[in-house]
Amino acid sequence: MDAELIAMQLFSGVALGAILVMVALGLSIIFGMLGVVNFAHGALFMVGAYAGLWIASLTGSFWWGLLLAPLLVGAFGMLIERVLIRPLYKRSIDDPLLLTFGLAYVLVEAVRILFGNEGMPFPTPPELAGVADLGIGYFPIYRLFVVGVVAVVLLLLWLGLEKTKFGLIVRAGARDPQIMRVLGVDVAKVWLLVFGLGVGLTALGGVLAAPMRSVDPEMGALVLAEAFVVTVIGGMGSLVGAVVAGLLIGIAISMTALFAPEMATIVMFALMALVLLVRPQGLFGKPGRA
Amino acid sequence: MTASVHSIAEVMTGPTGHRGWRARLTAWRVPLSILVLCLLPWVLPSQALAVNVLIYGLLAVGYNLLFGYTGMLSFGHAAFFGAGAYAAGLGIGQLGLPWYAAIPFGMLVGGALAFAVGLLSIRTRGIYFSMVTLALAQLVYYAALQSSSITGGENGLRGFTVARIELFGWSVDFLDPVKKYYVLMVFAAVALWLVSRVLASPFGAVIEAIRENETRARACGYDVERTKVMAFTLSGLVCALAGTLFALHLAIVPLDTLSIQTSGMIVMMTLLGGAGSFFGPFVGALAFLLMEDVVALWTPHWQIVVGTVFILFVLFLPKGIWGTLIAWRAGR
């Protein structure tokens, strides 16, 4: 086993992890603020991929798909929050979870009706096809691009949360929405935007992931389970945890695929079980939260 | 889940006052269920539907022990249903067990798996619990997919058809759907009676106390963790029994029995019927399967209708069909 192969596999793990980070971050942001576990998150990832494919085929350009699909699906997410989830805030925490599960069912079937049961190829944009020589080996340019986009989004997200007034409101609202209401902040509007943001992030993950695989209506189910594993390992509601655990899982999956391919689908669940045994609140979670 | 409180009242109030009808209903719930199950093949449009209602109803009954009565929303119960089904199939096909031994064998395997998953997942609470159960069930799914030399992988498990069953000098043609139904029903009836006993026992009161207020139950001196694992295991055992009956019925175990879709279907059936009520799960299984049958007649995309109906129930009728009926009758 030579070093170059290992480096390549490591890198493709980082690219895979970057996608997981997008999905898990969206899940974590929504949970941290609204206390809602979005079971439609995987389905919205899939919807994002299809929206990207659809827009790309309409405009003839991958870039429009990459730009518009997350915005469009994010706006759809805001509609979901407003119409379906908002009536449930005063109820048990299980109710939004059940509702979004039903929603996932509907979304998958709606995509089947619109685009068919079969998977569709999502071609790599020609500008990003091919490989680049980084000195330690040849890497697919598209994967480098994915890692770059995710890094930029993370930076923007961090700046937005730490340096802007909206970010301040979001962080304070996650601590204590009641006080925010007393201070005259329209919490409902903030929650609407946060839900849209979280859904937009997973849709972006979907568009970015699509050229690395094909697109099919069932792709969301596995992603949902992966995002759950990442959130459990990273710590629910912890954004740093989502990033670290996402990359960790991505690398773990691709390294196992290299050394013991038959274990690749199982390794992340084993890691999760281990974390649950040793540190049930997750690597970056606070004990009370678990 | 907005849990219905009435079942505690069922246990606590005697057959006096205006709650008398409800106490009588509770006292007669097992004979009533068995009577309805006996009639099922004759009132439903097809015998295939009756067997499915029986098996999925029992599955939802097992799930309801955990979700409805203990208040723990598991999204991984397909694992125990599937484990029971696979173990029964392998028991007959590979180990050469007779059919009646395959049933306890399947329950043993499914119950042991439920015990392990329960131990791990109750380390987390609330919403976390749902995610962990879902992820662990996915682990079981992929493990079954990978070990295709034993489980048959994507093709499912085959080669264990039970054509005729012999017991105490009786010989029943197991390929006859009606006879098969009544044989399977005996097991479901026994399970229903046991579940009813468990719910009426002090243990049943404790799990409902945990659902209503975990902190207070703990303060009262109950070992909440142990009770939760017990409830989880019991629930898994009933689901595994449903799995073994499913395997005997179909003579094939599709990989789908372990899938997240199956887990979700169990949740949907239980909620549609009424979580936390004794008759709810069977009502839910019947409603779900009827809906599937009817909608599938005019569109292959019946899931979009079922999903929409489920969303509407969560929004407007969270107590489900049976729970709403009971609440409405009690409110008059």
Image (spheres, helix red, strand yellow):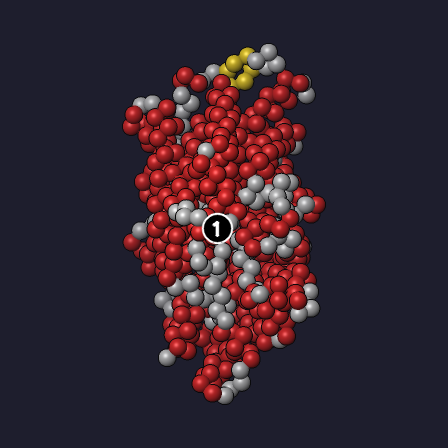
Q: Nearer the viewer, residue B37 or A35?
A: A35
| Residue B152 image point, x, y percent | 57, 45
> Looking at the image, is B9 positioned above or below residue A74?
below
Q: Horizontally, is B91 left or right of B81 in the view?
A: right
> Looking at the image, is B306 positioned above or below residue B58?
above
> Looking at the image, is A165 positioned above or below residue B70?
above
| Residue B233 image point, x, y percent | 63, 61
Which residue is depicted at the point 53% across and 82% down? B13
Res A285 → quadrant: top right
> Looking at the image, is B238 positioned above or below residue A57?
below
Which residue is depicted at the point 54% across and 18% down? A139
Q: Can residue A184 be seen from the camera position used here?
A: yes
Q: Can residue B149 be seen from the camera position used here?
A: no
Res B332 → quadrant: bottom left
Which residue is depicted at the point 45% across and 59% down? A91
Q: Nearer the viewer, residue A12 or B105?
A: A12
| Residue A13 image point, x, y percent | 58, 28
Q: Secondary structure at mark 1?
A: helix
Q: Nearer the viewer, residue B261 or B10?
A: B10
Can you say which quadrant of the picture contains the N terminus of chain A? top right
Q: Which residue is mark 1?
A: A179
Number of disc labels = 1
The amino acid at mark 1 is: Ile
| Residue A104 image point, x, y percent | 42, 47
**Residue farthest to the front?**
A183
Dot 1, crowdedness within 10 Å: few (<14), some or many (≥20)? few
Q: What subunit carries mark 1?
A: A
Which residue is depicted at the point 43% across and 32% down? A204
